[in-house]
Image (cartoon, rainbow, N blue to C red):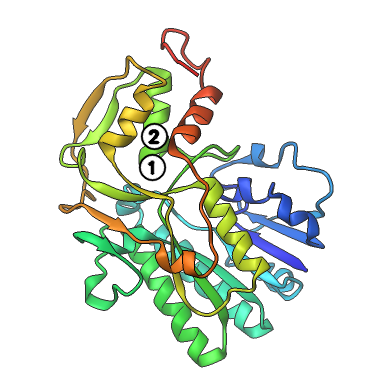
């Protein structure tokens, strides 16, 4: 079996391409355009896996022979920073919408399986516990990034009905956890970075006690592997969520490692008004499993940054 991973050098991709499960794969095509210049994600790749790296744009014709030669495509390539997506709608449209359409059409044309990572941010303004049955007008994405992912979900469903595309959509909670291609624009990782280098944690004014869904990176990788190994391409949507946490709970966990951290309250254009939790019950019933741990993940990431600022007291 051959696998194609777009956006292979990013936060999720750089961990996925090091997954032990890929040792049973014949070839792993790594696609990245170096937009974020994560060259280091290619350093020290493990032996025993046949990689084929291509510096390519997902909209280019170069994707055709790669997808034709692949059995499964994991489409990670996307503009993922929700807050800055407000300032670059054209780029979000090009990468997240046009790019997905191009990859999905090729998958449908060649009969390839597609794994599409969406986001629990598509739930938008909600209250209480939500699950995959929340549809239509009840889905209210609060950023161009989240809107583009909801667009992708709908597009794939339409393409499946028209052209028989076999796919699965995984709605990931906000990712936390270390990888060599790690990004720091989302809550847990951003707080870890700020704490480790001695900056105040920037917290949205209304967010301290609001709950949101989060996903440990190891659980996201496990979900991709589970979908591939069990051929779960049933055109369904599954929430992939390790835990639902308040910002206060996250900060308290970081304080155990960086006791002297400070907090600054700020405004955000994507701050939702309501607190909500996302259920992962449907994924559990499909055999997905979760072993992620916020405390251990924070400990691991902070240990990696422990010497970034010697004036910051860190307990690891």
Q: Pointer 2: what residue?
A: 190
Q: Nearer the viewer, residue 173 or 137?
A: 173
Task: Classify residue 251 by image quadrant.
Answer: top left
137 vs 76, left or right, is: left
Secondary structure of residue under mark 1: loop
Please say whether residue 238 is visible from this viewpoint: yes
- 285 lies left or right of 112: left
Q: Indicate whether 122 appears above or below 134.
A: above
- In this view of the protein, which residue sits in the foreground, 219 or 103? 219
Q: Mark 2, residues whose alpha carbon is within 10 Å: few (<14), some, or many (≥20)?
A: some
Q: Residue at x 29, y 22 (%)?
A: 200
Quadrant including the N terminus? bottom right
The residue at the point 73 percent across, 68 percent down is 66
For this orientation, the residue located farthest to the top is 311
> Considering depth in this image, is 158 or 229 the residue closer to the camera?
229
Q: Would you say the residues marked 2 and 1 are in contact, meaning their CB atoms lie under 8 Å apart?
A: yes
Residue 196 lies left or right of residue 143; in this view the side is right
Q: Residues within 10 Å of mark 1 (few under 14, many from 20)?
A: some
Residue 181, x across and y down, in percent: 57, 40
The reply to whether residue 53 is in sight is no
The residue pinned by badge 1 equals 186
């Amino acid at each position: 079996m051959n696998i194609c991973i777009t956006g292979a050098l990013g936060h999720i991709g750089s961990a996925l391409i090091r997954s032990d499960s890929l040792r049973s794969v014949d070839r792993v095509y790594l696609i990245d355009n170096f937009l974020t210049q994560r060259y280091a994600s290619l350093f020290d790749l493990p032996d025993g896996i046949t990689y084929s790296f291509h510096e390519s744009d997902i909209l280019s014709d170069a994707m055709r022979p790669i997808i034709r030669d692949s059995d499964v495509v994991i489409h990670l390539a996307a503009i993922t920073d929700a807050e800055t997506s407000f300032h670059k709608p054209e780029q979000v449209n090009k990468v997240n919408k046009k790019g997905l359409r191009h990859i999905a059409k090729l998958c449908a044309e060649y009969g390839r399986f597609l794994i599409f990572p969406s986001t629990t941010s598509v739930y938008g303004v909600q209250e209480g516990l939500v699950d995959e049955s929340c549809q239509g007008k009840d889905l209210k994405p609060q950023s161009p990034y989240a809107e583009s992912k909801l667009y992708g979900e709908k597009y794939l469903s339409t393409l499946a009905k028209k052209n028989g595309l076999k796919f699965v959509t995984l709605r990931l909670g906000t990712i936390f956890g270390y990888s060599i291609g790690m990004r720091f624009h989302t809550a847990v990782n951003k707080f870890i970075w700020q704490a480790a280098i001695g900056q105040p944690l920037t917290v949205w004014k209304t967010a301290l006690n609001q709950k949101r869904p989060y996903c440990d990176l190891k659980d996201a990788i496990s979900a991709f592997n589970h979908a591939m190994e069990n051929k779960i391409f049933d055109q369904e949507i599954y929430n992939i969520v390790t835990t639902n946490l308040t910002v206060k709970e996250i900060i308290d966990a970081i304080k155990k490692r960086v006791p002297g951290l400070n907090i600054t309250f700020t405004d955000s254009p994507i701050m939702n008004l309501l607190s909500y939790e996302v259920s992962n019950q449907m994924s559990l019933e499909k055999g997905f499993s979760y072993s992620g741990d916020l405390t251990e993940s924070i400990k691991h990431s902070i240990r990696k940054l422990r010497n970034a600022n010697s004036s910051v007291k860190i307990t690891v």
